Image: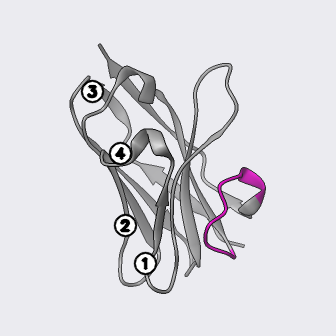
């Protein structure tokens, strides 16, 4: 059983930056960030593999967000730059066995979520 704890959310003005962190209780393979806005389905944001650090992003965040992980492979980060009001959501960290999954069912473990609010 892997426990994931997110941190780093908050309120920021449009154009600003935030960095989210997700600490895992053990070593993980693929890790990802999803987000969920009120009244909407949970949406894939980015994922990173556990071996070579391969990454994948949803189109709406390419060039603005960067996913990374530490060498111990127990913490994953999401650097979010040039934030827009439409990025407002609860952001969830997830861990799973295979890199590349862009749907929630591809991940076995989830954090509790951290709120990101971007004001216009």
Looking at the figure, which quarter contains the N terminus? bottom right
Badge 1 crowding class, 10 Å Cα cut-off, few under 14, some 14 to 19, many 20 or more, is some
Residue at the spot of label 1:
53
Badge 3 crowding class, 10 Å Cα cut-off, few under 14, some 14 to 19, many 20 or more, is some
Q: Which mark is residue 68?
A: 2
Residue 98, located in which quarter of the rendered image? Answer: bottom right
| Spot occupied by residue 33 in the image (x, y as percentages of width and height) | 53, 52
How far is the residue under mark 1 from the one under mark 2? Answer: 8 Å
| Magenta-span inclusion, residue 104 | yes
Q: Is residue 81 above or below residue 10?
A: below
Q: Nearer the viewer, mark 1 or mark 2?
A: 1
Left/right of residue 56 with respect to residue 97 in the rendered view: left
Left/right of residue 16 with respect to residue 66 in the rendered view: left
Colour scheme of the picture:
one colour
Residue at the spot of label 3:
12
Image: magenta residue range:
97-105
Q: Which mark is residue 8?
A: 4
How far is the residue under mark 3 from the one under mark 1? Answer: 29 Å
| Spot occupied by residue 37 in the image (x, y as percentages of width and height) | 58, 26
Secondary structure beneath label 2: strand
């Amino acid at each position: 059983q892997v426990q994931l704890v997110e941190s780093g959310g908050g309120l920021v003005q449009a154009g600003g930056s935030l960095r989210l962190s997700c600490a895992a209780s053990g070593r993980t393979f693929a890790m990802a960030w999803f987000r969920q806005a009120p009244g909407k389905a949970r949406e894939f944001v980015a994922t990173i593999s556990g071996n070579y650090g391969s990454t994948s992003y949803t189109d709406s965040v390419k060039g603005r967000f960067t996913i990374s992980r530490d060498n111990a492979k127990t913490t994953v980060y999401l650097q979010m730059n040039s934030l827009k009001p439409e990025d407002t959501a609860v952001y969830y960290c997830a861990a799973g066995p295979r890199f590349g999954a862009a749907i929630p069912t591809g991940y076995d473990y989830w954090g509790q979520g951290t709120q990101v609010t971007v004001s216009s």
